[in-house]
Image: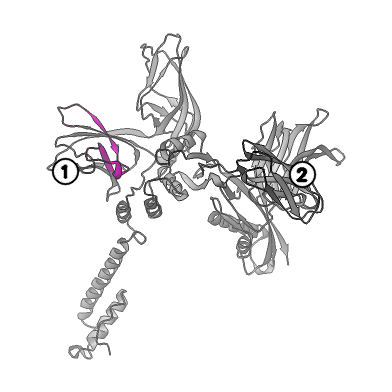
Amino acid sequence: MVDRLRVTELDFDTIKENLKDFLSQQSEFTDYNFEGSGLSVLLDILAYNTHYQAYYLNMVANEAFMDTALLRNSVVSHAKSLGYVPYSRKAARAFINFTGNTTTNTAGTLTIPKGYTFFSEDVDGVSYNFVTLEDTTVTKSNTDYTFINLPIYEGTLVNYLYVHSEAQNPKQVFLLPDTSIDTSTIRVSVQPSASNTQVSVYLLATDSSNTTSQSEVFFLQESLSEEYQIYFGDNKIGKKLEDGSVITIEYLTTNGELANRANNFVITESLVDSLNDAEIEFAVDPVSPASGGAEKESIDEIKFSAPVQFTTQNRLVTYSDYAAYIKKNYPTINSISVWGGENENPPVFGTVFVSMQPKTGYYVSDVEKQKIIDDIIKPKAIVAVNTIIRDPEYLYLLINSNVLYNPKKTILTGDELKNNVLSAILEYKDNNLDKFESTFVLSKAQDAVDAVDTNTIIGSEVVVRVQKRFKPSLGSSTPYTINFNVPLHRGTVTNKMTSTQFVVFDSTGTQREIFFEELPQSYTGIASIRILNPGQNYTSAPTVTITGDGTGATATATIVNGTLQNVTITNRGINYTRATVSITGGNGFGATAEAIIDARTGSLQTVYYDDFSQKQIVNSNAGTIDYDNGVVAITDIRILSVSAPDGFIRLSFESEKGIISTAKNTIITIDEEDPLAIVTTLEIV
């Protein structure tokens, strides 16, 4: 018997049945045919109304919390309570050298005014408008006016004028009507009245703790219509506008990320110097292509960034502070890694290292790096803490899979099955790699291959090799250090390091196309000693003691300015498979070091094959390999040219481990353009 309504069932059909069951228990409706009467319509309306109310209340509850909110204005409102303003579109910025050549060397100046226009070459069929945001003046040098690293921004400068009415706008809120605004370019100036032409420039308030009652600042917020608004203080936090004040707002509207990669600019307007000379020939030379353009922050990005930045409390102290603040103010990066100098070898105290992977391309330009340090990091960082931005280092994976399958259990051809395996590996890459602090798990990749067609694939064997690429300085004798940042597999006769080819002079002065060859060492003595901590306050050379399961190894220490500078092996010893190093005496403290055993090192030689397929050695001492730390050190070598079209030399080793994790500025990736990156062979059962 149903003597009460069930309120936990909220879909339409269940609500209606619930109402019918309840009414049928009432004496007034005994044996009543609900479906065959007009009461059915009333039950439909009541069920619909109940269902709507349930849905509405559920959505209201969702919107009350940032994690479950679906509407942008709800998420923005929650973010505002955390002191977070979602970033707008960001204009792409390029740097150019701009030269004006005159016919005389008479001293003068030339000014590029704010809003001066440049046009880019086409990007995907579209030419973009770039402008300057500040007046820039240079003095003539000989006959030239030269602007070095002039920043130009994609977009159009617009401005609006408002007259404040206390009666009509008591909250002092002014709408910025353009949805494509770059809020970082907003410039606000205020006149006390139309008759008083004294202009005050108001700045964006970023820290209310430093804002007094008379601070000339404005505040920024995103409106419910996804446009931006500015508003002013109340004479408690920030200066209040006077009635009748004239507010001028100027900013840049932009196409965001669409203009990234724009380059090779031309001008369409003439310039006149201080000598009234308009007969000037101008040349525009690109320094770095446009980059940094980005779209407005998405709902998911706001949900992630707002709580993270709230924890930073508007300061840069921890690693996560740096990561959150940089990503908010430079949103064109896909991934960021931050670490302290104490984790460097040797340690670099008082320094924070940052590495950024851009959304497009592989590296952030040097000019952009300096702008990030000067404009974003320095104003918020702790005094006396230095920041260094390093480029990402890419560790490329070469995946070779041997797939055992039964062709009778599939309608796919061999090529179609290979393509499906390729797609599965690339999907694994997209989901797990291509960012800092990523991990490649061989077993997971193999599972992805096996799952391509569980009916026909019996099993697979996947072998992964790691590859680093470096571009040599052609024509000069240069050493190179290639850091894989992961342990490397010690080569065998049939499974050695591979190297792409390059051209050098041999001992007779003949050009040879050669490659590096690995020569693994066998267990015997101590190859070298690596300093882990140089220590301090040493007044004399400490004693270096090597202990382990071998015999005879000795070494001496060199002290420079009170720290351990070098440890020199005086006797390599024999029969070591493990060894430890202790440093004692010398009146100092803190120095530590580790022993590198021959078995964990290898050497490089450069070779080529002659016309009779005989190996010829060009240099038998071309470098060393540290397998444990993944470091290849190449001795001075003069490389004339490289066989690869992109100018890179590639070194590839089998990975020592099936789990490859990155640290610091290393990113694991698979080069989809490399035909050797993913190779699949099929074996019929």
424 sits left or right of 552 in the view: left
Per the image, label 1 sits on a secondary structure element best described as loop
The residue sitting at 54% across, 52% down in the picture is 437
- The residue at which mark 2 appears reads as 603
Q: Is residue 205 magenta?
A: yes
Query: Residue 177: x percent and y percent?
Result: 27, 41
In which image quadrant can residue 682 be found? bottom right
Query: Sequence-wise, which precedes: disc 1 or disc 2?
Result: 1
Q: Mark 1, mark 2: which one is toward the viewer?
A: 2
Q: Main secondary structure of the magenta part?
A: loop
Amino acid type at image mark 1: Asn
The quarter of the picture where the N terminus appears is: bottom left
Task: Identify the magenta region.
Answer: 192-219
Amino acid type at image mark 2: Ser
388 sits left or right of 485 in the view: left
Kindly check if marks 1 and 2 are in contact, taking CB atoms under 8 A apart as contact: no
Query: Residue 466: x percent and y percent?
Result: 66, 50
Disc 1 versus disc 2: distance between alpha carbons? 77 Å
Residue 213 seen in render: yes
Residue 169's mark?
1
Residue 126 seen in render: no
